[in-house]
Amino acid sequence: MSTSLRSLSRGDVRAIYDRPLLELVARAARVHREHHDPRHVQCSALLSIKTGACPEDCAYCPQSAHHNTELEREPLLSLDEVVERARQAKAQGADRFCMGAAWRDVTEGKAFDQVLEMVSTVKALGLETCATLGMLDRDQADRLRDAGLDYYNHNLDTSPEFYGEIISTRTYDERLATLAAVRDSGMKVCCGGIVGMGETDEDRVGLLHELARQDPQPESVPINALVAVDGTPLADQPPIDWDVMVRMVATARVLMPKTVVRLSAGRTELGEAAQAMCFLAGANSIFLGDRLLTTPNPEPDADESLLEKLGLAPKRPA
Ligand code: SAM
Ligand code: DTB
Ligand code: SF4
């Protein structure tokens, strides 16, 4: 879509983000209805296939080896375990299965070969596949694509200028290089960020600007609210105000009309009414299941009841 939206300056993005909230929501809702079926919510499920002991120092992440969290580390799951979990996810209404590994980057070898096998086996169940494995190069992206990977998740997380406050073990440019490898391989890009880490509105705008100016824009944009985990440097961050989530979703929708915007981590704390406003403002994807990677997500019954109240339907596989 629209060269014009991709070429907006950061100031232009700021002007959209700063609109009175209900005007912004109304505009986003209009854009949403032009490009999407507003009664559909895409449902993904997440599984941590390798947990903890990550060499990166991401301040928000319970899986970083730099922080003292109570998280139980777990080596790479077996193919059987992953396939069983994917089957369950499908039975619960998910149409995409996302496998996350606490790796800095993909390294050639047995573990990567096992992940490739997981991807092709999950794909064969009739699910869309997504993985988030850290940085990778073009050759590794091609191998994942050939195994049947539909989406690769790799977040920019925040603005380029705030990034160094949150992560010191890698750079924004390295993130962009991985995103380029994914894009060039022909896989779909899932790329978003986190709010509630102590960033300013200008950082949120900076993130949205970086996302929107990618060419093509990401097919999927997850908006996460920080899940503050004890033992991480961000453990004491106050919960984000609900209107920030609504503003993020609505601005993302206006800037990236065709993108699927996922209301990701933080739904448990957000409450039903604020989630409803996010759906109105253009969010059209969630993670189903009571666990994200390592932290809680709403119970399936609660989500079913919320979607029913709102007249929203998960898009189930044919
Ligand atoms: N290690 C890989 C990487 O960082 O690219 C993949 C897994 S990592 C856990 C996936 C994403 O989860 C991160 O990019 C971050 O946006 C999100 N995330 C991690 N911890 C979070 C938290 N406590 N709250 C919200 N989002 C979080
Ligand atoms: C994304 O943006 N959010 C998901 C997914 N991509 C991999 C991960 C959220 C993780 C929340 C913290 C946890 O459960 O460990
Ligand atoms: Fe590692 Fe990813 Fe967590 Fe950063 S976000 S510490 S790279 S698992």
Image: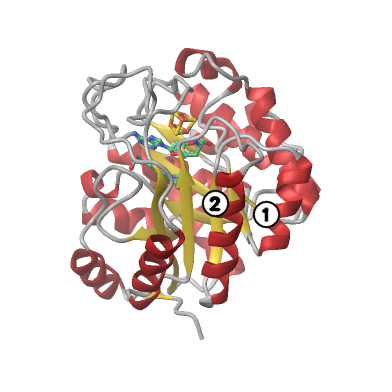
Say what secondary structure mark 1 lies in: helix
Q: Which residue in the protein does label 2 denote?
A: 131
| Left or right: 125, with 149 as reference point | left
Please give the name of the residue rendered at 57% of the width and 40% of the height, measured from the top-left corner: 154
Q: Quadrant of residue 269?
A: top left
Pointer 2 with pointer 1, Cβ within 8 A: yes
Residue 47 lies, with reference to residue 233, above or below; the image says below
- The amino acid beneath tag 2 is Ala
Q: Is residue 268 left or right of residue 22?
A: left
Which image quarter: residue 11? top right
Amino acid type of the residue tagged 1 in the rendering? Leu
Q: Secondary structure at mark 2?
A: strand
Residue 90: x and y in percent read 40, 74
Name the residue that disc number 1 marks: 144
Q: Which sits in the foreground, 12 or 215?
A: 215
Above or below for 216 versus 15: below
Rendered view: 47 above or below 230: below
